[in-house]
Amino acid sequence: MKETDNGPEPVWMVAANVVAWRRRGAGGQQLFPGTRSFKGGAKVYVARVHWGPGGDRLTVIGRERHTGRWIVIDTATRHLHGFRPKLVHTPRVLARLNDVGNRRELGPDEALTISETLERYAQQYRAELSPHSPHPDRCLCHACLTGE
Ligand SMILES: [Zn+2]
């Protein structure tokens, strides 16, 4: 981590938000707010993309839903939306990013390209979840809320 007089140097990252509600359980018939680790709507930062099997999983940094502590955890890309480039100054986020290690530095343009790709993947993986089961009544999942 590079340091300046005012703390760690800011770093371009991809930020996103956890979906408010997601389908879960058999046939995706239950709705769950957020993920096990994050509240719905929580802001997270992508620390690593697992491109191998098609970008379906990410390592993210965010505040744990119960404790508010900054954690690093793998999550499914479909649980996130609103991917966007963000110049991050928050020292605790940068410290966690440093812990992840083995990271290539991004510029704003590359962060934007990755954001657009991940947004497509997230939408695609949401659509592929239980494709033959109708959504529950009055579904609140991201696809139903936004009509994506
Ligand atoms: Zn739905």
Image (spheres, rainbow, N blue to C red):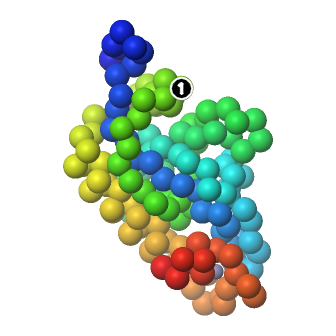
Please give the name of the residue rendered at 34% of the width and 22% of the height, measured from the top-left corner: 9
Residue 112's place in the image compared with 66, above or below, is below
The residue lying toward the viewer, choosing from 24 and 62, is 62
Q: Is residue 129 visible?
A: no
Q: Is residue 132 visible?
A: yes
The residue lying toward the viewer, choosing from 147 and 34, is 147
Per the image, the residue denoted by label 1 is 92
Please give the name of the residue rendered at 39% of the width and 19% of the height, measured from the top-left corner: 8
Q: Tell me if 135 is positioned left or right of 112 in this view.
A: right
Q: Disc 1 on helix, strand or loop?
A: helix
Indicate the position of residue 119 as horizontal and vertical percent values: 41, 64
Please give the name of the residue rendered at 76% of the width and 74% of the height, measured from the top-left corner: 30
Q: Residue furthest front?
A: 6
Residue 44's place in the image compared with 114, above or below, is above
Indicate the position of residue 123 as horizontal and vertical percent values: 46, 72
Report which quarter residue 26 is drawn in: bottom right
Q: Quadrant of the N terminus?
A: top left
What residue type is disc 1 on?
Arg
Q: Residue furthest top?
A: 5
